[in-house]
Amino acid sequence: MISDFIGRYGRWARDAIALRLARLDLHPNFLTLFGLLVNLGAAILVSWGYFFYAGFFLFLAGAFDILDGAVARMTRQATKFGAFFDSVVDRYSDLVVLIGIMIYYARETPAHSTLYVALAGIALTGSVLVSYTRARAESLISECKVGFLERPERLVLLLIGCFTEVPWVHDNYFLHKMPAVLWILAILSHWTVAHRMYYTWKQLQLADSASELPLPGSEVVEDGPSRDWVYLSEPRQEP
């Protein structure tokens, strides 16, 4: 019930904002590119350690990622290329933020950590492969949306990591959770990849098994004369 309530009013808010943007005659692809620029700003802030402020940029970029599709549908500008363009830009948006995190932990600061640089790199690889495995699987089977850590979940985790990095509070158990977020992203992204690989394998196995079953009415007929002869002429009578 709660999820239905959030979904209903979330769609209402999205459509209301999208309607205002549509009246401004903004092309959906412009909104997609603007979202990428906002993510780039978040990556720059993250690379300098301003995680808390970068969280607002990530939130705004996520909003534009939702609104571009809604505006495209309202203005009847939804196209196959637009969907492709949005998907490619989304990959760039994912990468720049994680690269920013890698730069932050690689810099010579008190927060320097080779481990967290590696975790961010593993999470970056996983985020690319999550999208790739779905695209590749759906060229072989009808649909592959299994797995927990898709792009919305990754965004929520990054928002949690950013907003808990409050710079003016140090000793609080519930704050400074970006390292924990990196562990979750690094593990669950590849878990999702493995899940999609297994799911695709099972679906292909089922398809191969179904193709080997004989079609109705195609049973093999035993050799020998058929019992149902059709005489085109009267059989010859012996004298």
Image (cartoon, grey):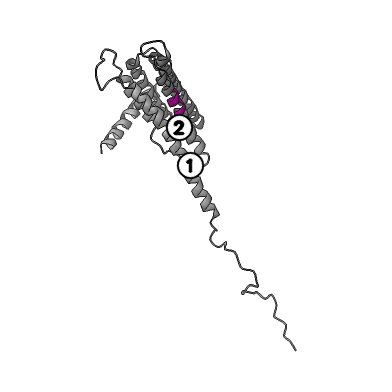
Decide: is 205 above or below 166: below
Marks 1 and 2 in Cβ contact (< 8 Å): no
Q: Residue 217: give x, y in percent of width and height.
A: 55, 63
Task: Classify mark 1: residues with Cα within 10 Å, few (<14), some (14-19) or many (20+).
Answer: many
Q: Can residue 48 be seen by looking at this rendering?
A: yes
Secondary structure under the numbered disc 1 in the rendered image: helix
Of the numbered discs in the image, which one, if any, rests on residue 200? 1
* Extreme residue in the left direction: 172
Number of other residues with Cα within 10 Å of mark 2, as a class: few under 14, some 14 to 19, many 20 or more? many
- On residue 130, the disc is 2
> Quarter of the image holding residue 159?
top left
Q: Is residue 29 left or right of residue 7?
A: right
Sooner in the amino-acid sequence: mark 1 or mark 2: 2
Residue 18 showing in the rendered view: no
Position of residue 140 measured from the top left corner of the image (x, y, whole percent): 52, 41
The stretch drawn in magenta includes residue 44: no
Residue 24 is drawn in which quadrant? Answer: top left
Three-letter amino acid code at disc 1? Answer: Thr
Taking depth in this image into account, of 184 and 54 the one nearest to the observer is: 184
